[in-house]
Amino acid sequence: MGVYVITGATSGIGAKTAEILAKRGHEVVNIDLKGGDINANLATKEGRRYALDELHERYPDGIDAMICNAGVSGGRAPIPLIISLNYFGATTMAEGVFDLLRKRHGSCVVTSSNSIAQGSARMDVVGMLNNNPDEARIVNLVKDYDPKVGHTFYAATKYSLARWARRMSAQWGASGVRLNAVAPGNVRTAMTANMLPEQRVAMEALPVPTHYGEEPLMDPVEVANVIAFVASPEASGLNGVVLFADGGTDALLHSEKVY
Amino acid sequence: MIIDDYIKALRSKDHRALAECFVEECRLFDYCPSLVGRENSFVYGRKAVDMFFHNQFVLGGYSILDPHMVNSRTMNFYANYRGTIIHALAQIENVDDAEGLIQELVIRPA
């Protein structure tokens, strides 16, 4: 059985993914702000460094998968937190365990979002994150924005995260480490439970075809099963893929984008 | 006439009422969005019409302006794609004989 590391697995999609992997007999390591096997604030450089040091100390022979799932939604969270946790918290952790993944021909999965297809992402921020990822400068640039427009920054971090995975996947794949992104639709989590009224209206306007006429939020297990599969050796043919696990929302709204 | 219901649903941005203008196995094609840099729409099925326009009315910035019924199967109108206006024609190509509902509707630039 393998060693699967997952960030943000204390609740939501992460917790369900961890549960699925543990049931399959894997050793699961949850890195979260609290309630984790390793408690660290991945929105900070110090927290990431601590978590990476811990992983290297505990698993010198390598790990089988890194699932970068920790994230915060837009609407209430400060914009710098969205930037630091969603993008830098994921890419820094993934890059920081590359050597451990390589030792066991492992895989990395990052949690993106199907909001990347809705056209709401701040593409200027996407460009900065992907092309000039200077965290301090970007955070300073966005620090005064009203959290009410946080969804555009949230989508930007998730867009850039998916693009980062696409860009890095060839080199990583050729080095024996697969790198993919899973883009969930609206899922019932702690984040969605605290939505503002206008956020709920927007959420309901992103229909989930497989839930037509029902609660418009997917169950976390629907996404967790996909993440667990993409992270597993059974998905050895997948690399550089952004897999939409959204019940068909993206296909409904963008049927012509077959590639 | 079904075209009256269609226009009324569009004007009021009522996605459910709009879907009810169509038979279950319907087709709705819109060739105007590409003129404003968007993806043209190819929507199959009443439930998909419901969901698609729910999204378009709330998040897509879609609405219609100044609709004129040309005949029982054609509407001349301005399609508003988030502030960019396209003069368009909506043509009901096929209607179900039994239910009187739309089977196929195509929207083209006027």
Image (cartoon, rainbow, N blue to C red):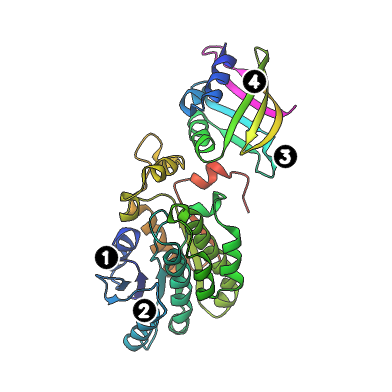
Amino acid bearing label 3: Leu
Q: Residue tagged by mark 2?
A: A47
Between disc 3 and disc 2, the foreground one is: 2
| Residue B20 painted magenta | no
Return the disc, 4 or 3, that comes first in the chain's sequence. Answer: 3
| Residue B102 painted magenta | yes
Q: Residue tagged by mark 3?
A: B35
Amino acid bearing label 1: Lys
Q: Residue tagged by mark 4?
A: B67
The Cα–Cα distance between marks 3 and 1, rounded to whole angstroms, is: 52 Å
Rendered image: mark on residue A107? none
The Cα–Cα distance between marks 3 and 2, rounded to whole angstroms, is: 48 Å
Q: Which image quarter: residue A209?
A: top left
The Cα–Cα distance between marks 4 and 2, rounded to whole angstroms, is: 58 Å
Q: Residue tagged by mark 1?
A: A23
**Quarter of the picture holding the N terminus of chain A:** bottom left
The Cα–Cα distance between marks 4 and 3, rounded to whole angstroms, is: 19 Å
